[in-house]
Amino acid sequence: MGRGKIVIRRIDNSTSRQVTFSKRRNGLLKKAKELAILCDAEAGVIIFSSTGKLYEYSNTSMKSVIERYNKTKEENHQLETPTSEVRFWQREAAMLRQQLQNLQENHRQMMGEELSGLSVKDLQNLENQLETSLRGVRVRKGNLIHQENMDLYKKVYGNRDANGVSRSPLVANSLSINEDLHAPVHLQLSQPQQQNYETSGTTELGLQLHSQ
């Protein structure tokens, strides 16, 4: 013979009520655990007995579940209530304005302005920040200058072989391929060549290039 339909109402007998509470509590916690495992859900169950005793279950942590619940409920309430949504964006705008103001104030202090309200410790911290920034700028500048010098050296001297002979295309037209670039070069002014003054009227100076 099957069981009859149970009327959902408060059980008057305290013993029966306690037995039913224990059975259904365990069943509810079991179902919550199964739901969390089978469906990859975040579940949390809180139960207080009639005597005030606490029973709970969560597959993560009860604090995490409650925080997520409060946050989600607040967001949904803000979306449902236009006035609350306006207040939310007003708070966001006020926070962004404050951040902008702080950045502008910090920038002015970096430029040496509006320092009257700073203490000695604040000024020391500001000085340390500037020195750190300056060191970074100098290192970057030094690296760039070094790289530019290396590029210029390669353009002028090119790649040298084992004998120290340059293969640079910039000097190949004026020096022979076996000529040492670092050999001293002497300039000598030759005697002026006599010209027919009747036809020219000018004196030419000869410039000779000698390489040793």
Image (cartoon, rainbow, N blue to C red):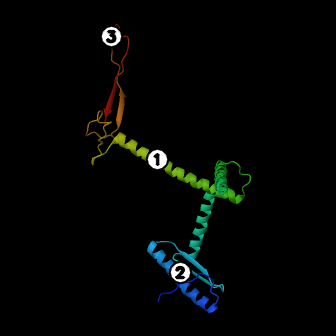
Structural crowding at the residue carrying mark 3, measured as other residues with C-alpha within 10 Å and reported as few (<14), some (14–19) or many (≥20): few
Q: Which residue is mark 1?
A: 144
Q: Secondary structure at mark 1?
A: helix
Q: CA distance from mark 2 to mark 1?
A: 70 Å
Q: Tell whether 77 sits left or right of 153.
A: right
Mark 3 and mark 2 in contact? Answer it, CB < 8 Å.
no
Residue 201, can we see it?
Answer: yes
Quarter location, residue 198: top left
Of labels 3 and 2, earlier in sequence is 2
> Type of residue at label 2?
Leu
Q: Position of residue 98 (x, y in %)?
A: 67, 53
Label 2 SS: helix
In this rendered view, identify the residue nearer to me: 34 or 3: 3
Residue 166 image point, x, y percent = 30, 42
| Residue 23 position by quadrant | bottom right
Q: Mark 2 or mark 1, which is nearer to you?
A: 2
Between disc 1 and disc 3, whose residue precedes?
Answer: 1
Q: Mark 3 falls on what kind of element?
A: loop
Q: Which residue is mark 3?
A: 196
Residue sitting at x 36%, y 43%: 154
Q: Which residue is mark 2?
A: 28
Residue at 64% x, 88% y: name it. 12
Earlier residue among tags 2 and 1: 2
Between circles 3 and 2, the one closer to the viewer is: 2
Q: In the image, what residue occupies the spot 48% across and 75% down?
A: 35
Which amino acid lies under the numbered mark 1 shown in the image of this protein? Leu
Q: How many marks?
A: 3
Q: Residues within 10 Å of mark 2 (few under 14, many from 20)?
A: some
